[in-house]
Amino acid sequence: MNSRRTFLKQVYGATLALRTASAVPSWAIASGQSDSVVIPGEDGMIVRSARFFDLETPVEYFDRWLTPVSRFFVRNHMHEPSELSAESWRLSVGGEVDKPLTLTLVDVGKLQSHSVVNTLECAGNGRSLHRPQVPGIQWGKGAVSTAKFSGPRLRDVLQQAGVKPSGKHVMFRGLDEVPGKVPPFIRSIPIEKALDPDTLIATHMNDAPLTKHHGFPARALVPGWIGAASCKWLTEVKVLDSEFVGNFMSPGYRFPNQPVKPGDSVKPEDTRALTGLNVKSVISGPLDGSTLKAGKLRAHGAAWAGEADIVKVEVSIDGGSSWSVAALGREQSHYAWRLWSYDWDAKRGDCLIQCRATDSQGRVQPAAAVWNPSGYLYNAVDEVKIHVA
Amino acid sequence: MSHKSVLVLLLMSAGAGVARPGAQSAKVNEDLPAGSMQQKATTACLECHEARIILQQRLNKATWTKEVDKMVKWGAVVDPNDRDMLIEYLNTNFGPEKAAYGPMRTSSEKNSNPNTAKKPPR
C-alpha cells in the first residue's frame, strides 16, 4: 500500500515531469536511424500509429512477468489530453447516486489503495492475423502487457456516493480529445463488475504514477476484461440505469453471437458487448524465422485467460501431432499471465513450434480463431517456424 | 496550418541536436502513395490521423467503401463527386493482395537502435 505522503510526492513529481516533457513533441523526433522514431519513455516498440499513439510490444519482450512501463503497449483511440495537471484534475461521480461527488487527486490519494496485477489486452490484439483481413489497427501479437496497478477501489468511491437501486451500469469518460465528428470515447460496465473489489481507479503502475500514455493521473482498471473497459485519463464516473448508448458500446466492441461469414451484415441484437478476455498463449522465443544450433533448445512465452486462471500450456514441435506440457512460471496472480517454458533436444531440420493454453473454466485455445468483422479476440494456437542447423 | 507545417515547426523547436546534418532521418510522417487522389486523400484523411493507419490496411473494395462512408460521417471532408475515386484509390493501393506493411520501432533515446537491443535470455 502506498503511504499518503509518498503518493502525493509521486503524483506531483509526475506533473512536473509531464510539463517539462510537453515542451518537446516527442512523437515527432527522428532518431537519426532510418528505422526508428525517438519517443521518450517508449523502448523498441512497434509503431502502429504515431498519431494517435498505438504502440505494440514486441513478443520478445514477454520475457518477464511484469512489463516495464517503457515496454507496455499503448492504445489510444484519439488525441491524448493536451493539458493535464495533478492540481486541476477532478473526478466527478454522479448519475444514479444519492450524493454526487467531485474528487481531487489529493482526495483520491486519501482513500485506501489496493493493488492488482493485471494482464491488459486490447480486444483487437492479433487483428492482422484474421483472414480475410479486417479494418482497424493491424496489431500483431503484442497489444498485451502485464503490470501491477494500484489505486482506490471503484467500489469505495461508489459507496461514498451511495448507488441508488436504479444504478445498473457505470459509465467512464476520459479526457481524450476528439478529432472531427468522431464520437467521444465513452463506455460503461455492469454495476456488478464496477463493485468488484479488484476494479480500481488506478493512479499507479508498477509502483510509479501513471505516465501520460497510460492515463495520468487516473484510469479505470477493469481486470480481466478487454483493455477498452479500462478508460484512461478518467474524469467522470456516472452511474446509469442501463448500458451506455454510444459508438464504442455499439457497434464498437461487440462480438457476433453466432459465427458470421465475411460480407454478412450482423444485426446489433445478434451481438454481445465484449467483456472478459479469451484463453490464449503466445511464443516469445525462439523468434519466427530464426536459425538455431541443434541440441538443447528452450521455447518460452506467456499465457493468460482474463478472469480465469491458466492451468496448462502445451507445446508441440512436430506440427501438432503430439503435445507436451510446458513448465509454468513461479509468479502468478489472478488476472495476470503465466510465463511458461519448454525444453527439448532439437534435431537438425525445419521445426514448427506451437503452443496452446487451457484455463480453469475448461476453455482450450483453438486451432483457428473465430473470424468476426472487427477482428476482435484473436486467440488461435500460436506458432513459429525455426530452422535447426 | 497543415499538420505537415506543424510538424516542421515542432521539429525546429525540438532543437537542432536531434536531427544531425547529413544523418539519414527516419520518416516520421509517412505519405500516401502517388496517384490522382493522393492530395484529396491526404486532405480528407490525414487531418485527423496519420498515414500509417491507412498504409497498414489490406481491405477489399466493399470494406473500403464502408470505411470511407464511416469516416465521412465522422467528419472527413470528401466531395460526393470524389467518393468513388477515393475508394478506388484506397482499394488499388491497399487491397488484400498487397504485401504487409513494415512498421518502424521506437527508440527511447536518440541514436539508439531498438533492433539491436539486448535479446531476451533463453
Image (tube, rainbow, N blue to C red):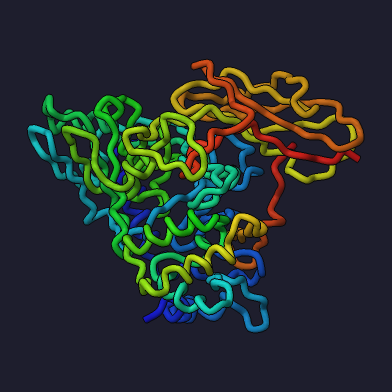
Q: Nearer the viewer, residue A75 or A4?
A: A75
Q: Nearer the viewer, residue B38 or A66?
A: B38
Farthest-out residue, left: A98
Which residue is at a point 24% across and 53% down the rendered structure image?
A89
Asked whether residue A387 is in view, the answer is yes
Residue A237 against residue A196 in the figure, above or below = below
**Residue A44: percent from left, percent from top:** 61, 55
Q: Nearer the viewer, residue A314 or A135?
A: A135
**Residue A292: percent from left, percent from top:** 85, 41
**On the rendered image, what quadrant is the C terminus of chain B found in?**
top right
Which residue is at a point 20% across and 29% down the rendered structure image?
A168
**Residue A220: percent from left, percent from top:** 33, 40
Q: Is residue A233 left or right of residue A129?
A: left
Q: Is residue A328 left or right of residue B9?
A: right
Which residue is at a point 62% across and 64% down the rendered structure image?
A36
Residue A224 against residue A179 in the figure, above or below = above
Location of residue B113 by image quarter = bottom right
**On the rendered image, what quadrant is the N terminus of chain B found in?**
bottom left
Asked whether residue A6 is in view, the answer is no
Q: Is residue A298 left or right of residue A157?
A: right
- Looking at the rendered structure, the number of numbered marks drawn on it comes to 0
Q: Nearer the viewer, residue A131 or A331?
A: A131
**Residue A58: percent from left, percent from top:** 62, 47
Residue A128 against residue A285 in the figure, above or below = below
Which residue is at a point 43% across and 65% down the rendered structure image?
B49
Farthest-out residue, bottom: B21
